[in-house]
Amino acid sequence: MSGLRVALIGLCCSIAVASIRAADLGVARHVAVAVCDLEGVPNPIMRLGEKVAGEVYRDIGVALEWADNECRPGDGVFAVSIASRAVANTLVTDHTLGFAESGTREATVLYDHVKRFSRRYHVNRGVLLGYVMAHELGHLLLPPKSHSATGVMCGTIDLQLASARQLRFTSEQGALILSKLAERSRYTAAARPQNCCDASRAPSDIAASLPQTTSGSTAAWPTHVP
């Protein structure tokens, strides 16, 4: 485990990057998120996941308002489906934890993969679930190809920082998300089916051994991982 964590730290996310603080932004922006739980996630795990994801967004001045068991969300609501890879019926690697496409309103978290990696690397399942939800929601709010070298939008999760609940958006990402939400009334992009794959972005041998999420509209095969 220690060796893996050292590798992860060296690979991409050695420190949490300072982000815009909610206290510096005045009144928080509220974002409705409908969660469609197709896997029967235990309530304590789901509550912790929502709390962890909420911490990430609260840090940049955004308040997430969760609506559980909402599989047919109304207009203007972001949606997160909690599903298995079989139910999601999409072509992704065994190490992909979730996927989303920039410009849509729908993200998917692969709960069977979250469970497997939380057991294998001894990371609290609710915490890992929360960071995957935060990451995939980030893809909905950020431009395409929005993976970063550090923080919650890193292409490969730093499990040590995740366990310490220290993953956050970069300052630039926080500013982009707030700008996106400020123009929310003009946001008209319709959700569309998830696409894959961009063969030019196939993961390296090292990255293929690590838990991953997608990089947005162009890939379900990230080169580095949320």
Image: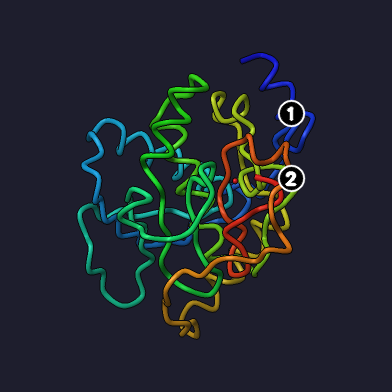
61 on left or right of 70: right
Residue 119 location (% of width, % of height):
43, 23
Badge 1 density bin: few <14, some 14–19, many ≥20, Cα 10 Å: some
Give the vertical position of 174 relative to 166 (above or below).
Answer: below
Residues at marks 2 and 1 touching, judged by CB atoms closer than 8 Å: no
Circle 2 sits on which residue? 204
Which residue is at a point 59% across and 65% down the rendered structure image? 197
Which residue is at a point 57% across and 24% down the rendered structure image? 164
Residue 162 location (% of width, % of height):
56, 30
Which residue is at a point 47% across and 34% down the rendered structure image? 128
Q: For the residue labelled by badge 1, is the local secondary structure a helix, a strand or a loop?
A: helix
Q: Which mark is residue 9?
A: 1
Hey, what amino acid is under mark 1? Ile
Image quadrant in which the N terminus is located: top right
Q: For the residue labelled by badge 2, is the local secondary structure a helix, a strand or a loop?
A: loop
Which badge, 2 or 1, comes first in the chain's sequence? 1
**Between marks 2 and 1, how big is the CA–CA gap?**
17 Å
Judge by depth and name the residue closer to the eye, 79 or 55: 79
Which residue is at a point 56% across and 70% down the rendered structure image? 102
Front position among marks 2 and 1: 2
Badge 2 density bin: few <14, some 14–19, many ≥20, Cα 10 Å: few
Hey, what amino acid is under mark 2? Ser
Residue 126 location (% of width, % of height):
38, 32
Residue 78 location (% of width, % of height):
38, 66
83 on left or right of 102: left
